[in-house]
Image (cartoon, rainbow, N blue to C red):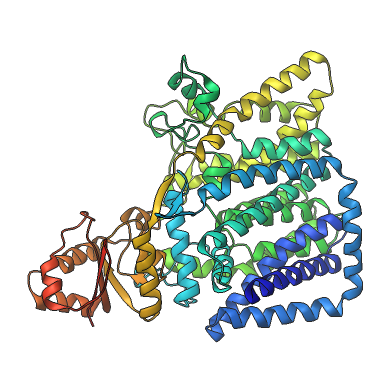
Amino acid sequence: MIFLLIFLLSLVVIFLFGFIIFDKYTEFLTISEKALCGLVVGTVIYLILVYLGSSITKNIFLSTLFIDLFFLLVVLRNYKKIKKILLLPQQILTEKTVVFTTLFFIMLFWWQYPKVLLQPSPLGLHVGRNTYGDTQIHAGIINSLAFAKNFSLNNPFYSGEKMTYYFLTDFLSSILVIYNFSLTMAFLLPSLLFSITLILLLIFLIKRLGGKSISIFLAPFLFLFNSGLGFIYFLKDHSGENLFLALFNINKEYTHLWDKNIQFTNMIGGFLAPERPLILGIPLFLIILLLLLTQKDKKEFNKNLLFASILTGLFPFVHFYFFLTTLTCIAFFSLFDSSRNNLRKWLLSLFIIAFISLPQVLTIFNSVSRHSFIKINFGWMVKTNENILWFWFKNLGIMPLIVVLTLVSKKLKKEIKYWFLPFVFLFLLINTVSFQPYVWDNVKFLIAIYLAAAIIASLYLEKIFQSRLWKKIGVLVSIFFLIISGFISYVGETQPHYLLFSSDDLTLGEFIKNNTKAQDIFLAQTIDKNPVACLAGRTILMGYQGYLWTQGINYQLKEENIKKMLNPQHLGQFKSLALQYKVSYAVINKFDNSMIVNLSFYKDNFPIIYQNKSYLVFRIF
């Protein structure tokens, strides 16, 4: 109970601190905008400060108390500004469309997230189709920070390597775990809170661009239910059946069909739920766009541009791809505003961004500098002999057509069209260059591109809807095709339940967490959901090869040595390798056949310190 109370107090002071910061250092924002932006930015600042404090004290809980006290002192010193918060309920209640839209999307998130984010049962913890591949990785980062005090950001899935993953969202969940929340709640609460925040920020941005009631609801709807031609394959698969009943008996992801090369999966189930950095990354990106859009005195270096520059500088540890996207936007905006006097303010903005972000960028690139990440790759995921226009039509449906009509139409102001140009450039870029060994990861740029497309498309469709009846019908038909595949995917995401962590995994994780040292290194088979790393937060010699490959890690030599250690020829060979890799324990999964294990060797030479139906744990040194 005491931890819950501290958490709630922390949330309040974070919110008030963020509001005060926005009220003091930005201009021309409404109370609602300041409050919502303050929640996100206050959280980001809080996480950075707690992480820095934890790196020094080696104690997350103590660091949160110090930062809570600091935030509280700032709040008390600026108590007069807090009175403005009292105007917030009145301002919210006057925005009926905003309230309706928010409640609608709260229901959408609440219906899906609890079903796909570590749903508990007597058998263990279950996940959905798309959350299966990522949840174990995030669980490992969360528990490594919480229980192994891994503030130097060593990779829990590969000993001796640094993490290249942007970790700040997972650090928030680590704090919740330290506050005695279950791992399920540590995943669920941030996802719900910041997904709703994302919707509200998107609404505020739409309003700033001149959107009314239709586009306020339509923009988040188009974004979250992104659609290609997957619905055609759904109709083929269920031809002659009752389609309503078929919706609740789906065994495919119709926005991510590998055999049809449809790769742009549904935004809610395929991105926001599994790709956890997005839940802070997209809101922060929208806040920066909002700040850039609300500059009134554009000839001088102003408060909003300064604050946008600082936030961009803080971005790399939140989401590196959205950091690059934001840099692209700022570079283009500076070109549109390129008179001599104005150029100086943009150069100053870029200097501030570089000064703040450089240590984070160097930390990330220090981990990947040995590997070749960036390479020429035409057409993103287009297959050999596949028509690139057909590929994008399959993946994006009619959205590119709507965007083209928007850009050539006179319905929208030129400023809004110019605002979209950085995203055109990014679209060309992801069709030319790959930024990670796993080419599909370019999709993280595509998320930002589609977000911007949903914004201008909703503004355009709103204008068209105000015309004649046949145009209204055309808009409704367009919306149907823009969301139908995404809707099918959304409904289908919750139907398959995969057991991610069994009860044996959970009990093993608890034992290791409570009976081994934070710095201990474990030998184990290279399975994709190893409870040593995922649940206890300890470092294993090497995890799942597919995960390591996407990070550009050259694991082949270590993999061969692990095979030798699991099936050694003699004790001397094993001890030599175990000393080389500083192995303290070996954990053997009895039912995994991915590598040959000489179980008799271990039983003859090392003591068993724990066992259950699925695992044996041996003390090595």
Residue extending farthest bottom: 57
Is residue 438 something one can see in this rendering? no
What residue do we see at 83% from left, 69% from top?
20
The quarter of the displayed image where residue 586 is located: bottom left
Image: 28 above or below 460: below
Image: 100 above or below 127: above
Is residue 482 something one can see in this rendering? yes
463 or 477: nearer the eye?
477
Residue extending farthest left: 570
Residue 93 image offset from top left, x and y in percent: 88, 48
Image: 544 above or below 509: above
Quadrant in which the C terminus appears: bottom left
Q: Is residue 620 left or right of residue 215?
A: left
Image: 177 above or below 204: below
524 or 604: nearer the eye?
604
- All told, the count of numbered labels is 0
What residue do we see at 40% from left, 58% from top?
551
Residue 483 image offset from top left, x and y in percent: 62, 30
What residue do we see at 43% from left, 49% from top?
132
309 or 607: nearer the eye?
607
What residue do we see at 30% from left, 57% from top?
527
Residue extending farthest front: 122
